């Protein structure tokens, strides 16, 4: 595993895998990172991404396009701040996303949480623009998506 620091973003590279943590912004030259990723299929894990701005989104798009030109890209544990951005761009295909984070709320106890949604297990619901009901970590009752489905689910639309 190779650790790379790009401004306020940290990346861990291993064969076929990139894990990102921190902020994707003007201090994150993702083009440099893409050059360090071996050609071929790659899984990109953005669980630790906490922020992205417009310049960061431009860098993200360059990064993704470079990786796609060299193999299949699969996204796992996509951060909530990134999935909402990916939903605004027709370039992204939900079939490449295996899981993502989304803001949920519990009608029973009032808890709010960012939960990990398994996009493979819930593929049919997501294609229909329906967020799966997930158990509340506080009381166990079903939680509902706390935002408009379009912000998180458009990328999966059939």
Image: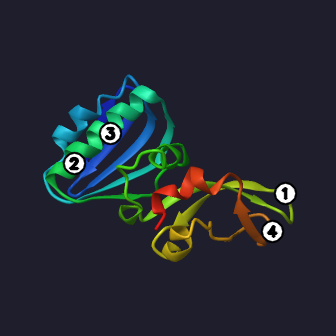
Is 18 positioned to the left or the right of 105 in the image?
Answer: left
Residue named by callout 4? 139
* Badge 2 density bin: few <14, some 14–19, many ≥20, Cα 10 Å: many
What separation in Å lies between label 3 and label 1 (alpha carbons)? 36 Å
* Residue 22 percent coordinates (x, y): 46, 36
Q: Toward which corner of the image does residue 137 lie, by quadrant?
A: bottom right
- Labels 1 and 2: the sequence-earlier one: 2
Identify the residue at image location x=54%, y=68%: 126
* Badge 3 density bin: few <14, some 14–19, many ≥20, Cα 10 Å: some
Quick check: marks 3 and 2 in contact, CB under 8 Å?
A: no
Eye-nearest disc, 4 or 1: 1
In the image, 145 versus 158, the foreground residue is 158
* Residue 142 percent coordinates (x, y): 75, 71
Question: With respect to residue 52, does 89 lie above or below?
Answer: below
In the image, 87 versus 18, the foreground residue is 87
What color scheme is it?
Answer: rainbow
Q: Looking at the rendered structure, which numbered label has been put on residue 110? A: 1
**Residue at the farthest top position:** 26
- Labels 3 and 4: the sequence-earlier one: 3
What separation in Å lies between label 1 and label 2 (alpha carbons)? 41 Å
Q: Toward which corner of the image does residue 31 lie, by quadrant?
A: top left
Eye-nearest disc, 3 or 4: 3
Residue named by callout 3? 61
Residue named by callout 2? 67
Identify the residue at image location x=58%, y=53%: 150
* Badge 4 density bin: few <14, some 14–19, many ≥20, Cα 10 Å: few
In the image, 10 versus 157, the foreground residue is 157
- Labels 3 and 2: the sequence-earlier one: 3
Residue 136 appears in the figure: no
Q: Secondary structure at mark 4?
A: loop
């Amino acid at each position: 595993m190779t650790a790379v620091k790009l401004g306020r973003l940290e990346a861990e590279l291993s064969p076929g895998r990139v894990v990102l943590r921190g902020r994707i912004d003007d201090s994150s030259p993702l083009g440099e990172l893409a050059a360090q990723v071996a050609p071929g299929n790659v899984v990109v894990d953005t669980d630790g991404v906490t922020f992205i701005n417009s310049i960061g989104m431009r860098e993200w798009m360059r990064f993704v396009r470079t990786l796609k030109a060299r193999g299949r890209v699969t996204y796992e544990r996509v951060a909530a701040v990134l999935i909402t951005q990916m939903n605004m761009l027709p370039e992204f295909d939900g079939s490449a996303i295996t899981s993502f984070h989304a803001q949920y709320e519990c009608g029973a106890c009032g808890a709010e949480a960012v939960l990990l949604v398994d996009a493979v297990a819930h593929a049919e619901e997501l294609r229909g623009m329906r967020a799966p009901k997930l158990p509340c970590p506080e009381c166990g009752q079903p939680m509902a998506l706390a935002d408009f489905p379009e912000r998180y689910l458009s990328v999966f639309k059939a």
